Image (spheres, rainbow, N blue to C red):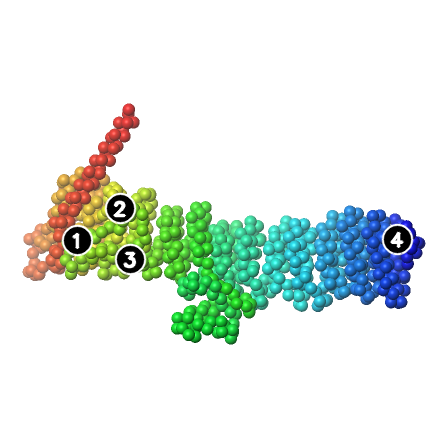
Amino acid sequence: MNAERDLSPLTPGVVRALTDKLYEKRKVAALEIEKLVREFVAQNNTSQIKHVIQILSQEFALSQHPHSRKGGLIGLAACSIALGKDSGLYLKELIEPVLTCFNDADSRLRYYACEALYNIVKVARGSVLPHFNVLFDGLSKLAADPDPNVKSGSELLDRLLKDIVTESNQFDLVGFIPLLRERIYSNNQYARQFIISWILVLESVPDINLLDYLPEILDGLFQILGDNSKEIRKMCEVALGEFLKEIKKNPSSVKFAEMANILVIHCQAADDLIQLTAMCWMREFIQLAGRVMLPYSSGILTAVLPCLSYDDRKKNIKEVANVCNQSLMKLVIPEDDEMDEAKPSMTVPAEPTSEESLSKPEAVTTGESQNELDVTALNQPLFFPCSCERIQVTLNLDGIVQVLDYHLSDTSIGMMTRIAVLKWLYHLYIKTPRKMFRHTDSLFPILLRTLSDESDEVILKDLELLAEIASSPAGQTEEGHGPSDGSDVRPGPVELHVPARAGQLSSSSTKGLECSPSTPTMNSYFYKFMINLLKRFSSERKLLETRGAFIIRQLCLLLNAENIFHSMADILLREEDLKFASTMVHTLNTILLTSSELFQLRNQLKDLKTPESRNLFCCLYRSWCHNPVTTVSLCFLTQNYKHAYDLIQKFGDLEVTVDFLTEVDKLVQLIECPIFTYLRLQLLDVKNNPYLIKALYGLLMLLPQSSAFQLLSHRLQCVPNPELMQTTDNTKPSTSFKRTAASNIDYTELLQHFEKVQNKHLEARHQRAGRAEQLDRRVVL
């Protein structure tokens, strides 16, 4: 810069003025440069023009001296003004030194750089678009500048650039997106505001389709939505709202699949606004894209399920999450069960094309392949195409079940979430049973544990699901046996003295134990369910006391009551914990005698007219022997009064405890209930029911003179004198027919079985008493 020849054609006066500290002198020099460049333009002297720009750039704008840099900036702006429309030919040389000054430490110099660039852009207009990325990059930095004057200047330049982009149809969006994607993650508020403002501008330009590149910037937009500034959050809400409107208008051009995981992440955000907005987007995506969203189901459920348990403070999020959950559930269809592993990459085109028929020539040659195509055709209305390309759609059932299992196992999860999980599992077993039964062994333990839940509603849904698993044809194994249950060996046949014509159990006994000919066949998981349910009751006595009756009654509604009682009685017959067996039998007996759900089963047992009913009675009787009083009540229910009397006679040989007398007391109370109305009416027929009266007197003799004693005594006092009941009609009552029908049951053998079981109980009580006495002695020592 010392040699004048190096700076020609600039005169020494212009050079001195450009480096002056006073702005006015630099402005005068700039006017001289403008005049000089205009002359070169008139002469079409491009080489001199480039030389002037190079001098201003290298010797001034990029100088180490601050005043020289200021002079260089105003000089470059003057060149641009002088060039006018021709400035587009020299934009690279004009813009680069100015942008370099954007990083200057001196705020005044940054302001002058902003001013210079404004003048350059104002003259060049649309010609600056090829250099848009570098301009945007520089502006994004100035937007966060700490100096208010610099920021103000950058805003003027920003508005000018937006006007140019809006009125132009040559904007290079493809080249700009990578820069936008990078800058959108800035944490500076002003930079974020700058980014959002540009997105809004680009979105408003009809010729610019920003929607195609939404997957590139959506994550950044949701992060900006969590900004501390209300103004920025509002701007971001507007931008996202505009995008969503566009998506609803043109769903066929939206890349739903590429944005699904982004939404899943932000649906789990701690910020309520981000979470609500993302959830609203997810709702629209599921409804618009349909089955395109299925591959992302596990992620969607991970985000949505916890929201279902939100309280009223997050009511809006909860409501939208519920819609998402319901909509996603509807996307699973029965055909998903038929899409096996042999064709995991099954795709569905947006529209059938001639290429499709060519791509599957085997469909023409084989009938089996033709059937597969028919299944695909059934799916097509439910596959919402989001572009003309082929879209792979698969149901990731393993991932879904894993998510559902996790949320059901997590004790901190809310009640509504657990209910939703159980509904999902039930829905999957209904729609895709074949695939779901592959997961049953892993799900079974958690479903059994869920029976201990505090919520009745959760337990009801759990029972519905377990009932579906236990009764679904898809759960039937070839062997007819349930999955191995460790130490639990399937019991052998129960030998009942019932003739073959009366429905004696088959030698295999498996199906005979689970059901009789009058009941529907359960699958191989039914028996496993019964075994594990009783295990649960045995290990968790509180569950049996508080929810046992509720659970069994609901199962009797959901499944066949006869199957349930038949299988439980058979399992209890082999129960080693005799005390639990007695308690469980008492519970089952109370349910049998008092529950409205078992009305039909009681009627079936009351008459014992069919082979199935006699078969059931014998099965129940053998287990009911664990509890003497319940055995008598079963005989009363089945009108086996002579056998009831024989049992009561054996009570003299039993150890009469307080618990025993309490149960007799309860039986007396039951006899006064509506369920035994027929029994009380039979007391009128003294001649044909002598053993009924004897059995009741036997109970009376067992009781101490308590309120129950008084109650039964008053009842027996009402039994009429047989002579007063004589009538001219000597026709025998209908009960005599029942006696004949049931006489083929070997009651002697049943009585011997009763004695055998009670002897086991006596030995067990003595052993427990002995162990307790030894423990007491140790404590004393």
The three-letter code of the residue at mark 4 reads: Leu
| Residue at which label 2 appears | 584
Q: CA distance from mark 2 to mark 3?
A: 30 Å
Residue 716 visible within the image: no
Please name the residue that numbered disc 3 is placed on: 479
Tell me the CA gap for discs 2 and 1: 22 Å
Residue tagged by mark 4? 18
Q: What is the C-alpha distance between the residues marked 4 and 1?
A: 119 Å
Query: Which label's residue is closer to the chain start, 4 or 2?
Result: 4
Please tell me whether residue 754 is drawn above or below residue 164 in the rendered image: above
Find residue 672 and report its horizontal and vertical position in percent. 21, 49
Please tell me in which quadrant of the rendered image residue 277 appears. bottom right
Nearest to the observer: residue 147 or residue 719:
147
User: Quick one: SS at disc 1?
Assistant: loop
* Residue drawn at (22%, 43%) of the image: 663
Q: Residue furthest top?
A: 781
SS assignment at label 3: loop
Q: How many marks?
A: 4
Q: Quadrant of residue 372?
A: bottom left
Quadrant housing residue 40: bottom right
Near mark 4 (Cα within 10 A), the count class, few <14, some 14-19 or many ≥20, is many
Check disc 2 and give the amino acid type.
Answer: Met
